């Protein structure tokens, strides 16, 4: 599915129209999720100019990044690159890609300064000018990335399916795309998709949630998880009028590169135990917005959830009992199932 705006439209808006966050006309490109407490001291180490020109819409920084290769799609001035740099450590590396030279200039200006601030002997980050649809142009090889992140940028891509296809190409088996972006509750009109301000403000390229589901299914991903969702409001009456009845949401989503997942939650009697070993998560771990695992407490899970935990970098932190030898039908799932009984474990598959 190809949108009607072009790379040049986006490059102009982010390279010439926007100078700082104060120039934005909606709440789309502002964090809807608070930075987790354990990351705030790390964000504080990042240069002020980088943070002033940060246009993200969420906090797409997953857990368990030590030693990983992380790819930041649409990295802009590099805030999330420099945050991930501290989390992957000197044995990991972070690759930032963006098509806007003005933003990359800011990111590169602080590369050695951040290396020193983080106490690294050598920089573990690199910045590349290029397109998310063509990661091979900057030398990102097949199955070479542990985690891909993106912060309110994929909506700006004219050909989103090509972007997701490329992400899945470069992710390792069991690797993860963890991203925040703008979604809509219906398909947008042609006028909205062509409006340069709506596009630049991350609304004109918003994906209808059902089209996103269909697109991921076409690419072999039949289950993904929502981490957080928050409504977006235009702060400009004129933009609000242009949006009409369309409702926009900033959503943070995780997609595991696990083609074996099914399109429904199936019950094989499996049980997951969180071991409490993820840094800064000693008591509980949230896989998504309703799978909340308490340390040491067994939680029945569907086969998809079991695979997400057992066949990804999360595996050392969980114990999975059972296998897929005996099938018991559809898993009784949904976020409401956990609150219907005081005896229920928090969360259930969806």
Image (spheres, grey):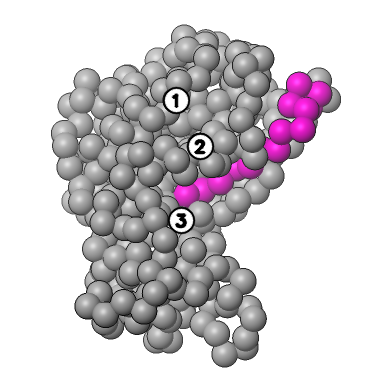
Residue 240 placed where, x, y %?
78, 27
- The quarter of the picture where the N terminus appears is top left
Residue 140 placed where, x, y %?
20, 31
Residue 317 placed where, x, y %?
30, 73
Dots 2, 1 in contact, CB < 8 A: yes
* Residue 68 visible in this rendered orientation of the protein: no
Q: Residue at x 38, y 59 (%)?
A: 63
Per the model, the C-alpha gap separating discs 1 and 3 is 22 Å
Q: Residue at x 55, y 85 (%)?
A: 344
- Asked if residue 36 is positioned above or below residue 279 in the image, the reply reads above
Residue 86 placed where, x, y %?
34, 50
Mark 3 or mark 2, earlier in chain: 2
Q: Residue at x 78, y 28 (%)?
A: 244
Circle 3 packing at 10 Å, graded few (<14), some (14-19), many (20+), is some
Reading the image, the residue beneath label 2 is: 211
Residue nearest the observer in this picture, 58 or 104: 58
Per the model, the C-alpha gap separating discs 2 and 1 is 9 Å
Could you say which disc has been placed on residue 225 in the image?
Answer: 3
The quarter of the displayed image where residue 81 is located = top left
Residue nearest the observer in this picture, 113 or 342: 342
Mark 2 or mark 1, earlier in chain: 1
Q: Which residues are magenta?
A: 240-253
Q: Secondary structure at mark 2?
A: helix
Reading the image, the residue beneath label 1 is: 1
The quarter of the displayed image where residue 246 is located = top right
Task: Indicate which label's residue lies in the foreground, 3 or 2.
Answer: 2
Q: Secondary structure at mark 1?
A: loop
- Asked if residue 114 is positioned above or below residue 224 in the image, the reply reads above
Task: Indicate which label's residue lies in the foreground, 1 or 3.
Answer: 1
Q: Is residue 228 magenta?
A: no
């Amino acid at each position: 599915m190809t949108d009607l705006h072009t790379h040049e439209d986006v490059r102009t808006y982010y390279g010439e129209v926007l100078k700082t966050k104060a120039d934005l006309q909606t709440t789309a490109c502002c964090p809807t999720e608070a930075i987790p407490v354990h990351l705030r001291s790390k964000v504080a180490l990042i240069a002020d100019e980088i943070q002033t020109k940060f246009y993200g819409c969420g906090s797409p920084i997953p857990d368990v990044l030590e030693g990983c290769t992380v790819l930041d799609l649409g990295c802009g001035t590099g805030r999330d690159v420099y945050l991930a740099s501290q989390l992957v450590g000197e044995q990991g590396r972070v690759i930032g890609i963006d098509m806007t030279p003005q933003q990359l200039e800011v990111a590169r200006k602080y590369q050695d300064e951040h290396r020193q601030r983080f106490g690294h002997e050598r920089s573990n980050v690199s910045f590349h000018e290029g397109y998310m649809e063509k990661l091979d142009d900057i030398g990102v090889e097949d199955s070479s990335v542990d985690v891909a992140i993106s912060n309110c940028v994929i909506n700006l891509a004219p050909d989103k399916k090509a972007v997701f296809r490329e992400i899945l190409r470069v992710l390792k088996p069991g690797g993860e795309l963890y991203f925040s972006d703008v979604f809509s509750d219906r398909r947008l009109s042609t006028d909205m998709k062509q409006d340069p301000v709506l596009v630049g403000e991350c609304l004109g390229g918003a994906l209808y949630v059902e089209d996103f589901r269909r697109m991921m299914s076409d690419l072999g991903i039949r289950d993904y998880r929502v981490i957080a969702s928050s409504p977006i409001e235009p702060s400009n009456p004129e933009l609000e009028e242009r949006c009409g009845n369309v409702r926009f949401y900033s959503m943070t989503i995780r997609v595991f590169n696990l083609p074996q997942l099914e399109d429904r939650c199936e019950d094989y009697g499996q049980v997951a135990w969180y071991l409490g070993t993820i840094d800064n998560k000693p008591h509980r771990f949230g896989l998504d917005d309703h799978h909340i695992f308490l340390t040491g407490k067994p939680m029945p899970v569907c086969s998809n959830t079991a695979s997400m935990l057992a066949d990804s970098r999360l595996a050392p932190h969980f114990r999975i009992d059972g296998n897929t030898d005996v099938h018991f039908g559809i898993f009784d799932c949904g976020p409401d199932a956990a609150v219907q009984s005081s005896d229920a474990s928090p969360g259930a598959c969806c």
